[in-house]
Image (spheres, rainbow, N blue to C red):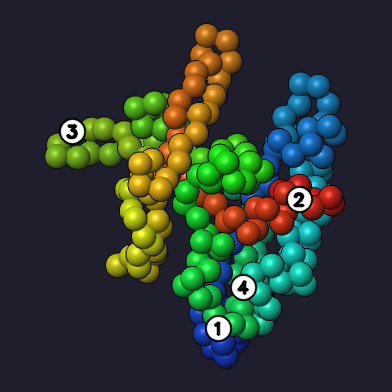
Amino acid sequence: MHERIQDARTYVRQYGRPDLFITFTCNPKWPEITEAILPGQKANQRHDITARVFRLKMGKVMALLTKQDIFGPVRCFMYSIKWQKRDLPHAHILLLLTEKIHPSRIYYFISAEIPAPDKDHHLRDIVTSHMVHGPCGSLNINSPCMNEVIRNGTRIKECSKNFPKEFLKDTQTGHDGYPLYRRRKSGDGGYTAEKTLGSGSCRGTFTVDNPTTHCSPGLSIHTSMSNSATV
């Protein structure tokens, strides 16, 4: 572990800061997992299955990034795999590209908008199924992301991930180093989608828009259309 940390520091010292920080998370609804567990079992109860499936898909993702160069030639990379509260693994990946990202291609790498319904149905389905935060806030006060805080002497609950975000016409550089992504309103070039959650008497449909969305169009399309790994 110490040697690998030293390697990572050498990369940064030689080539500068990483260009991309990618999080890849195990999905308990992957068919390779749901078809392998027994009736009544949950994915987080079968670490032997989830770890094996995640490792195979992780290898495919790294091949897409470092061999097929879907984001461009990669100079070097590093990643770490973690297991946290929900017992499912996730990976943090850092990529240092040979060529720096041009601002004109930023929306291929990262987008915070729901795709147009008449242009890319496949990507739209991916985003609305997996890349919509919540619901939380007034729609679901018991969401896991809701934390109790005190505002002006009043105890309230709010999203710990700061969703929903604000509408923005263009991507901006944030004061803390994190960018503020373009999230256009419905009448200003943005789109909405209907999402249904729950079952029985608790089943409900609500409208989602760009303040609750985030994805990587390029990575999502390449991984979802792969025959050997559906991410």
Residue underneath mark 4: 95
* Lower position in the chain sequence, tag 4 or tag 1: 1
Q: Which is in the foreground here, disc 2 or disc 4?
A: 2
Residue underneath mark 3: 154
Q: Give the residue at x 50% y 29%.
A: 194
* Dots 1, 2 in contact, CB < 8 A: no
Disc 2 marks which amino acid?
Answer: Met
Examine the rendered structure and indicate whether residue 20 appears above or below residue 164. Answer: below
Residue underneath mark 1: 12
Q: Residues within 10 Å of mark 4 (few under 14, many from 20)?
A: many
Q: Position of residue 116 (x, y in %)?
A: 53, 44
* Lower position in the chain sequence, tag 2 or tag 4: 4
* Lower position in the chain sequence, tag 4 or tag 3: 4
* Dots 4, 3 in contact, CB < 8 A: no
**Residue 225, which numbered label?**
2
Q: Which is in the foreground here, disc 3 or disc 2?
A: 2
* Lower position in the chain sequence, tag 3 or tag 1: 1
Q: Position of residue 169 (x, y in %)?
A: 34, 55
Horizontally, residue 207 falls left or right of residue 77, namely left
Q: Position of residue 215 (x, y in %)?
A: 55, 52
Q: Give the residue at x 56% y 39%.
A: 117
Disc 1 marks which amino acid?
Answer: Val
